[in-house]
């Protein structure tokens, strides 16, 4: 190339640079791509930054500053120089990292709060269960205490009743009439004595049906006891009983109440119970 041609080329490039500079100074808000010299390499903002779309970046709360700038360029299909784009991308990525860290921290705090609330609810449930268990145990304790008090009162009343009855049995006239007779359990069958003794049984009959005196006859091992004019429902009539002495008990062999005569062991047992059930439900009740 001739020297004249070289000078001509340099003059042309200088003229283009002056034109570009005048355009830059007069551009104001013109697009950056329009203000960049045509020989400088250009690049468009990517569709995703740090793997996130601009919508995702907005949802993350980081669509401001560099990220908002890139989103605007991307929407308008504008470009930046590679150096400028790299710097803006670095700023946007820093924003995204900060927003992700903030979101992670928010999620961590929310998770810890949820765990704390769950543990508080579970602890409250445990406390309520313990309190309910204590209430039930306390109720059972109070009921048991009340039952024990009732049983103790009933037992005391029964002991008082028994003591009074035993006193009346001991003061019955038949005790004096049989003073010389050995007191043993009575029996209605051979070898099967009851707990009720001879004198207790006859005293209970006396308490149930007061009489006008006794006729007691002893012949060998046989003992006959007649209650004269006992106050029976049908009038003042006699009650006669007969016993045969054995080494350990007195066996009842005869029982007549007024004109009712018990002819068998079973009949005598039933009639004996009827005679004593009201006055001595336990002591003279043939148990």
Image (tube, rainbow, N blue to C red):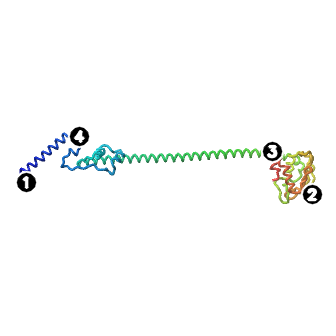
The residue furthest front is 76
Looking at the image, is mark 2 or mark 3 earlier in the sequence? 3
The residue wearing badge 3 is: 164
* Residues at marks 1 and 4 touching, judged by CB atoms closer than 8 Å: no
* Residues at marks 2 and 3 touching, judged by CB atoms closer than 8 Å: no
- Residue nearest the viewer, comparing 33 with 49: 33
Number of the front mark, 1 or 2: 1
The residue furthest bottom is 191
Looking at the image, is mark 3 or mark 4 earlier in the sequence? 4
Say which element carries label 1: loop
Looking at the image, is mark 1 or mark 2 earlier in the sequence? 1
The residue wearing badge 4 is: 29
Number of the front mark, 3 or 4: 4
What crowding class fits label 3: few (fewer than 14 Cα within 10 Å), some (14-19), or many (20 or more)?
Answer: few
- Rendered image quadrant of residue 231: top right
Looking at the image, is mark 1 or mark 4 earlier in the sequence? 1
The residue wearing badge 1 is: 1
- In the displayed structure image, the side of residue 8 where residue 153 appears, left or right: right
- Tell me the CA gap for discs 3 and 4: 123 Å
* Residues at marks 3 and 4 touching, judged by CB atoms closer than 8 Å: no
Say which element carries label 3: helix
Number of the front mark, 4 or 2: 4
* Residues at marks 1 and 2 touching, judged by CB atoms closer than 8 Å: no
The residue wearing badge 2 is: 220
- Rendered image quadrant of residue 187: bottom right
Looking at the image, is mark 1 or mark 3 earlier in the sequence? 1
Say which element carries label 4: loop
What crowding class fits label 4: few (fewer than 14 Cα within 10 Å), some (14-19), or many (20 or more)?
Answer: few
Number of the front mark, 1 or 3: 1
**Residue at coordinates 76% horizontally, 44% vertically from top-left?**
157
**Residue at coordinates 22% horizontally, 46% vertically from top-left?**
33
Q: Quadrant of the N terminus?
A: bottom left
């Amino acid at each position: 190339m001739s020297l004249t041609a070289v000078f001509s080329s340099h003059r042309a490039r200088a003229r283009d640079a002056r034109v570009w500079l005048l355009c830059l100074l007069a551009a104001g808000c013109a697009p950056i791509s329009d203000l960049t010299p045509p020989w400088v390499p250009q690049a468009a903002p990517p569709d995703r930054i740090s793997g996130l779309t601009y919508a995702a970046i907005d949802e993350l709360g980081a669509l401001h500053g560099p990220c908002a700038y890139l989103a605007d360029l991307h929407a308008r299909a504008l470009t930046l120089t590679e150096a400028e784009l790299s710097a803006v991308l670095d700023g946007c990525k820093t924003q995204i990292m900060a927003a992700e860290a903030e979101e992670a921290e928010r999620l961590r705090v929310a998770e810890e709060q949820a765990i704390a609330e769950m543990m508080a609810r579970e602890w409250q449930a445990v406390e309520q269960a313990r309190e309910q268990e204590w209430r039930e145990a306390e109720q059972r304790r109070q009921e048991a205490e009340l039952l024990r008090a009732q049983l103790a009162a009933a037992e005391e009343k029964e002991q008082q009743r028994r003591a009074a009855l035993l006193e009346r049995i001991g003061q019955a006239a038949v005790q004096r009439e049989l003073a010389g007779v050995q007191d043993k359990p009575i029996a209605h069958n051979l070898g099967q004595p009851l707990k009720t003794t001879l004198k207790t049984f006859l005293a209970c009959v006396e308490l149930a049906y007061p009489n006008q005196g006794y006729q007691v006859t002893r012949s060998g091992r046989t003992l006959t006891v007649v209650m004269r004019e006992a106050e029976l429902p049908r009038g003042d009539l006699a009650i006669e009983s007969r016993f045969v002495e054995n080494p350990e008990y007195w066996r009842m062999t005869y029982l007549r109440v007024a004109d009712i005569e018990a002819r068998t062991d079973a009949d005598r047992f039933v009639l004996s119970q009827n005679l004593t059930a009201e006055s001595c439900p336990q002591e003279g009740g043939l148990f």
